């Protein structure tokens, strides 16, 4: 188990640019604001979405693309470091016109129609991601 404790240093809140890529925009905020540890949440709507599902047997992500406008029911994630750079790991749930909800691991290719974010910046030693042999995933490691 990996366990660390943090204090909330600052809360960033704002609106994402229409037609911007969701995860790229969040990463750009983390980079420009120098956020190395924190929590992210977004609600809003997208004009298209891309998510993935990690196949635990093959240890590969299977991606799924939605070419339709969808609500962001919730998108939550965290900020840590990978190779010294802030990286956002986020999951997202979408709803369609019928109110059906589905989701997965947020990928590039999810394009914002309207997006409101809150990023909580933490102070303390940032967690660092590196390859984990058991899962094949870039998980937090003891550093
Ligand atoms: Zn994930």
Image: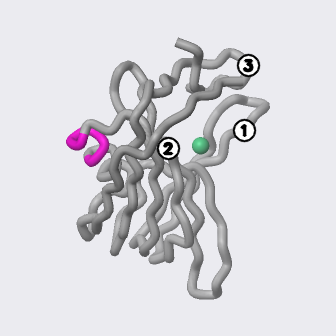
Q: Quick one: 9 or 102, which is closer to the camera? A: 9
Name the quarter showing ligand 1: top right
* Real-space CA distance between mark 1 and mark 3, rounded to the nearest whole angstrom: 13 Å
**Residue at disc 3, CB closer than 8 Å to ligand 1:** no
Q: Is residue 15 magenta?
A: no
- Residue 37 in percent (x, y) is at 42, 36
Nearer the viewer's eye, disc 3 or disc 2?
2
Label placed on residue 134: 3
* Real-space CA distance between mark 3 and mark 2, rounded to the nearest whole angstrom: 22 Å
Label 2 Cα neighbours within 10 Å, binned few <14 / some 14-19 / many ≥20? some
Nearer the viewer's eye, disc 1 or disc 3?
3
Nearer the viewer's eye, disc 1 or disc 2?
2
Secondary structure at numbered mark 3? loop
Examine the residues drawn in magenta and state their main secondary structure.
Answer: helix
Q: In the displayed structure, does residue 76 sit left or right of residue 83?
A: right
Secondary structure at numbered mark 2? strand
- Residue 106 in percent (x, y) is at 51, 51
* Residue 139, quarter of picture: top right
Q: In the displayed structure, does residue 94 sit left or right of residue 42?
A: right
Magenta-colored span: 29-33
Identify the residue shown where x is 26% and y is 70%: 18
Identify the residue shown where x is 44% and y is 25%: 125
Q: Quick one: 23 or 68, which is closer to the camera? A: 23
Farthest residue, direction bottom: 98
Secondary structure at numbered mark 1? strand
Name the residue carrying label 1: 55
């Amino acid at each position: 188990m990996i366990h660390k404790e943090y204090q909330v240093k600052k809360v960033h809140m704002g609106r994402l640019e229409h037609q911007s890529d969701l995860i790229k925009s969040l990463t750009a905020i983390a980079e420009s604001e120098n956020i190395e540890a924190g929590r992210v949440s977004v609600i809003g709507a997208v004009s298209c979405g891309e998510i993935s599902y990690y196949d635990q047997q093959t240890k590969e992500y299977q991606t799924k693309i939605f070419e339709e406008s969808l609500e962001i029911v919730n998108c939550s994630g965290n900020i840590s470091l990978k190779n010294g750079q802030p990286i956002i790991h986020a999951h997202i749930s979408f709803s369609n016109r019928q109110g059906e909800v589905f989701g997965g691991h947020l990928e590039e290719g999810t394009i914002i129609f309207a997006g409101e974010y809150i990023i909580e910046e933490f102070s303390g030693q940032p967690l660092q991601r590196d390859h984990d042999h058991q899962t094949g995933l870039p998980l937090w490691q003891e550093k």
